[in-house]
Image: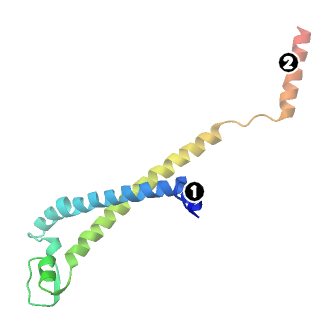
Amino acid sequence: MLSEFREFAVKGNVVDMAVGIIIGGAFGTIVNSLVNDILMPPIGLILGGVDFSSIMTVLKGDGPYPSPEAAKAAGAVTINWGLFINSLISFLIVAWALFLVIKVINRMKAQFEAKKEEVPAAPPRQEVLLEEIRDLLAKRQS
């Protein structure tokens, strides 16, 4: 059983998947920082100084609270619309980046296939033999 697990764990696909998951996690933190620290502050400023991360609806508790963290600490029940909007924008950025990566991969794959097709196929054996006979006859006549 241990040898089966070792064989499974060191297969190329498993290692590639693990690398992809690690890079994806790191990419996710970069995108979250991009959304929370770079994109949302100017958008909030344009919309009148709104901090999206603090937009919420208090369902139960003494409001208003300055942030969802403060509401949670006070035991309030909230719907955190702003955090959802931030997560939605993060998802759209990740989906767009993934779309672009897949598009580039598909384009490269299509170019590779096109190059494969450009290589002419070898002529049929009959044609090769006929060409050799023609060349031999031409040598005899000269």
Q: Nearer the viewer, residue 47 or 54?
A: 54
Which residue is farthest front? 2
Q: Nearer the viewer, residue 76 or 108?
A: 76
Report if the CB atoms under discs 1 and 2 are less than 8 Å apart: no
Residue 28 % position (x, y) = 31, 61
Residue 116 in which image quadrant: top right
Vertical side of 54 occupied by 4: above or below: above
Q: Nearer the viewer, residue 61 or 100?
A: 61
Q: Nearer the viewer, residue 4 or 72?
A: 4
Q: Which residue is mark 2?
A: 135
Task: Name the quadrant of the N terminus.
Answer: bottom right
Q: Residue at x 25, y 62 (%)?
A: 32
Callout 1 amino acid:
Glu
Which residue is farthest bottom? 60
Residue 109 % position (x, y) = 54, 48
Which label sits on residue 7?
Answer: 1
Residue 8 in which image quadrant: bottom right
Q: Say whether disc 1 or disc 2 marks the residue closer to the N-terminus.
A: 1
Residue 41 in which image quadrant: bottom left
How much space separates mark 1 and mark 2, taking CA atoms?
Answer: 58 Å
Q: Is residue 70 left or right of residue 117?
A: left
Callout 2 amino acid:
Asp
Q: Residue at x 86, y 22 (%)?
A: 132
Vertical side of 128 occupied by 86: above or below: below
Q: Residue at x 55, y 54 (%)?
A: 11
Residue 126 % position (x, y) = 87, 33
Vertical side of 39 occupied by 69: above or below: below
Label 1 element class: helix
Circle 2 packing at 10 Å, graded few (<14), some (14-19), many (20+), is few
Q: Residue at x 20, y 75 (%)?
A: 82
